[in-house]
Image (tube, rainbow, N blue to C red):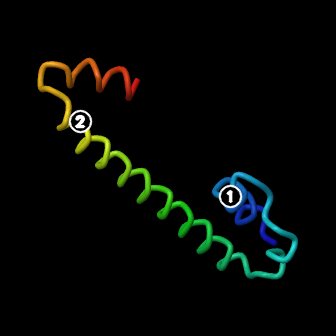
Amino acid sequence: MSTEAREQLSKELRDEPPESFGQLAPERLTLLADALKRERESRASGLNEAAEEALKLVPALARGPVRRILFR
């Protein structure tokens, strides 16, 4: 397993990859790490959008302080 590809995958998994991943080509490991990163970014973006939508339920005068409290 390529050291760079393994480190990248470990970073995205936030743990060591399973032993069986050692059989994959470095390109496949990099592809998997990139897919995990894109999915994590997509979910984070969706959560941010949902939070902004929820803030619309808060009265306008209180939105600034509520936003600062929630999103330090």
Quarter holding residue 36: bottom right
Q: Which residue is mark 1?
A: 13
Quadrant, the C terminus: top left
- Alpha carbons under labels 2 and 1: distance apart: 32 Å
Seen in the image, is 26 located left or right of residue 50?
right
Most foreground residue, 9 or 70: 70
| Residue type, mark 1 in image | Leu
Seen in the image, is 63 located left or right of residue 28?
left
- Residue at (31% x, 42% y) in the render: 51
Q: Disc 2 or 1, which lies upstream in sequence?
A: 1
x then y, percent, for residue 11: 67, 53
- Residue at (63% x, 57% y) in the render: 12
Most foreground residue, 14 or 30: 14
Q: Which residue is mark 2?
A: 55
Element on which disc 1 rests: helix
Quarter holding residue 48: top left
x then y, percent, for residue 8: 67, 59
Seen in the image, is 10 located left or right of residue 38?
right
How packed is label 1: few (under 14 Cα within 10 Å), some, or many (20 or more)?
A: few
